[in-house]
Amino acid sequence: MSFQLSTLWHDFGADPLEAYARFPSELSHTGDVGWTTVRSVDNVVGPIPFPDVEQNDIPFGWSIENYQVWCRGTLKITKQSSVLIQLHGVASFILTRNEKGTHLLETRLVHDVRVFGGGNNKQGPQCQFSITVHPLDYSSSSNGSSSSSSNSDATLLPDNTTAAAMATTLFSQRIRNHNNCINTMTATTLLGREMIKDILMPSFLHNIGFAGKHGALSIHNLTMDALQVVSIRLVFQAYYHTSDVLTVLRPAVLLQRSNHAMIVSGQQRRIGFSFDLSKNNNNEALFLKATKVHAKVIVSLATPSTTFTLVDDHTIIYSIDWNSNSNNNNNRSLSSSPIVSPVFSYTFLDFDGTVQYAKAKRPRTLDANENKPIILALHGAGVDVMKDSFWTNSIDTQESVWVVFPTGRTPWGMDWHGPSMKNAFCSLDGLVKVMDLLFSKSMEHHQQSSVDYGWVVGKLSTRLLISLIDDNLYSYSHSNGGQGAWYLATHYPDRAVAVVAAAGYVKIQDYVSYSNWISHSHIDPLLFGMLESAYAEYNNDLYLPNMIGLPILARYGSEDDNVPPLHTRKYIRLLNQHNNNPGLFKVSSVEGKGHWWDSVLNDKEVNTFLRTVTHSSGGDQSLCHGDSSLDQFTIVTTNPASTGPVRGIQIEQLTIPYRKSCLRGNIETDSSTLTLKSTNVSAFKIYNRQETTIIIDQTTFHHVKTHKNTLFVLDKDSNKWKIEEKKWPRRGERSRLSYGPIHRLYESCKPLLIVIPSNKHRQPSSTHATYHHLALQIAHDWYLYGGGDSMIVPDDHPMVTFEEIDMTVSVTSAAAAAARTAIRDEDDRSPSFFRIYLSVGKENQAITQLLSLEENHVDIELEKSRIQVGSRQFDGPGTGILFLCPGSSTNELAVVVSGLDLEGLELACQLLPKRTGMLVPEWVVTSPLTKEQGLGGILGAGFFDNEWQAFGY
């Protein structure tokens, strides 16, 4: 069955089956749809055709082809057993029982053009999904219903199985030889093979070494007990001739304390580790000559009753010879020779301490010139940087410029907002550290001429004081990455010197079909405006004044039917409007080309643009943001939490959070005076400017040391600006580091901690199972959509009941530094980390303690039969709430998800913004109507002021 148009609304519920016995759809000529029979082939259902559905994508592009589908099938189980069911490409599924017999399986699909593509106008948009059923090597009785709601990998787990039986069956063969070295260690069942999902290792550069010292593996806990990762060992077999093998055994260092490397039943976590081959001594030089390296990963795990070991020996890393000008990532002359390519992948610690990777393309010449630029290439939706060589081939090898291809943590890049942009910045810092590591190794083995002095990538964020032209960052991007380039240029303009945006859309609301949301027919426009304010910080057109002065090349194919050329033309029109010059920037329209073509970022026009801005030391001086001829400027933000310094000025606090705020500046060079007029700004910091006299709203400050991180604060009593020299903000007061909205939780500088009520509260088993399931869903969504890490703990866990216990072993300072690098923090304040608390009423004791803290001024009360926000009370069945509040530890922010009953809790959990585009502010009260009306079922929503007092609808 096919239903209404649009996208993302299914995350809020909005299922028409909740209100109708029939199946309405305006996509059909008759106004409703029915069932269509589709056969599965090789476990794949679809593509699913809809011959009676008409699509009109001319004014909208591919985004108009989003729709939802319900599919119904049967699953026959011949005997009572435990099975592993995996569905790929579904939004949610329901299986009604799991005993012997025939069972009804219903799946909800969403046709997302970012996954399935679009533009197939003759047959209309089609989607498909796959389902696999694996019997496990143990049996149990399980019953009841289970459900999951992810968008890609949903796993149904058996309800009960004894850990002892599993350990006996799973890991029966553990063989060691006499000198205690591993000989053979194999998980003998499907369950064992399914538990290690993937291994992440850096590239191996021929005669140089691994491009990074970090790796990671994903473990899916398919047992019924919580698992603790005790240790990880690595066995490297280096093949340097056809038959010669060198074996090296190395212990890996867990990046988290072992007792924090916990994986609850059903959870999948990526466990990071570091490794070091420098102690290889005499064998290291021989090891570096390897043409391929076979990596075996040995993981020791423990449950409360037993220990066992998992082994993955499927990782083969082929050596890369990067001393080549070739752009072919797979140019390999002989099977026993290294791959010849300037492109390699490297690993690094991201802002949250997880191990991530990016790819880089080395320049033809390695030198120590710090002033050269760096090209940051932001990919489009659905691009897998590891596998899709067309993307790394799309930009030529440069003479002395590095090209960095970040992942954004997912193929979808999360629209390059929040976590993805932080990931991009951390990938730059990570490359610098990798090059320092590799250069030192190369010098040790006398493989690098001393005249090169180092392999300098370019000036990055390694110092606290940043001048306007220190970060020579060029953004090359396409499609979703094109929008990401606009986002980078408008939110972090002091980090960029030029932008090439191809086929980029202006903002998500203009690209996907928000106008066709079911909710618009039910929601109060005032409430929708409040919800939309949660996403206003990503309105690139609103922030456009921040990027004035940057050299821009905006282009598209004239036949683009995915992102209509209207987006690029609109953005350039607005940019020229702000410059008061209608002809300043021109669009580059390439005749006859569609959304993508191989030379979109690599033709004569693009390369000429790059040479021009490179040779003019950061761009045409009439357009460069550091040019003194630009004597007037405007800084715009609705949320300084997602906006970096603009022209050396960082807005720190808004008078009314989440309202449009401006600083308008006028520079008088002769008198070294900067005049600022503020709108809705109550604090800002000047990091690095040359003026010595600052006039703010007619208040004058002489002999200001603007290069010393000067903080200006609006005094609430006198309404006059002052230089703040005391500790700020004061306790309980908010600033950009404690601003939300709730989607900020995915920018946590540590793994998310999900806190659920413990069993000691004597809940019914079904209630505790619901808490466990909801926590799993949150962890799964963050892992799936953002490559993130989470811990699930009860409310009596030591990490909750005591002061924050550091989760890391040796990477704490490195991860914190990476987080500051990612958000461009030039002060000493540590970035925030997040915890999520789940509860019905007061069942979670940690929430009760949190809200009773003297310094917690949030005006929300949770009672057994009512929820109170300010003076408003909500007491209907199925009512739920989620809200942001101060945490119990320093630098902690908390997201509380609660309900008057389990239904309310489940509905509130559904509103956690697991994907980009979800309109969730700092507090939301929901009701059962959301299942039918989506946002129309929300009872109230809004934000908190600087004193944590709620305001909104």
Image (cartoon, helix red, strand yellow):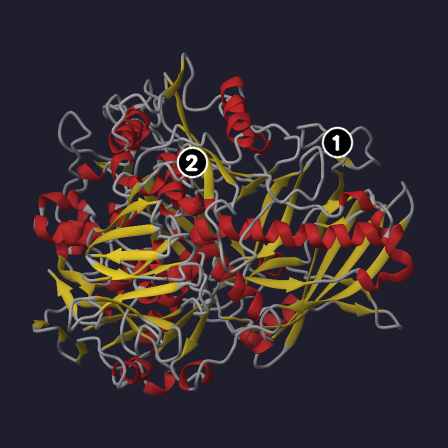
| Residue 273 point in image, percent of width and height | 64, 64
The one nearer the camera, 234 or 425, is 425
In what quadrant of the picture does the C terminus appear? bottom left
Q: In this image, 276 relative to 826: left or right? A: right
Instruction: Give the quarter of the image for residue 137.
Output: bottom right
Quick check: can you spot residue 715?
A: yes
Relative image position of residue 268 (x, y in whole percent): 51, 61
Q: Amino acid at mark 1?
A: Ser
Residue 889 place in picture, x, y as percent: 39, 79
Look at mark 1 in the image and give the residue it sits on. 324
Considering depth in this image, is 595 or 780 the residue closer to the camera?
A: 595
Relative to residue 875, is residue 583 drawn left or right?
right
Q: Is residue 56 above or below residue 249?
A: above
The answer to whether one can see residue 133 in this image is no
**Rounded to the nearest whole Å, what is the CA distance between mark 1 and mark 2?**
34 Å
In this rendering, the answer to whether 138 lies above or below 86 is: below
Q: Nearer the viewer, residue 79 or 239?
A: 239
Work out which residue is located at the far front of the displayed protein and give it.
670
Tag on residue 624? 2
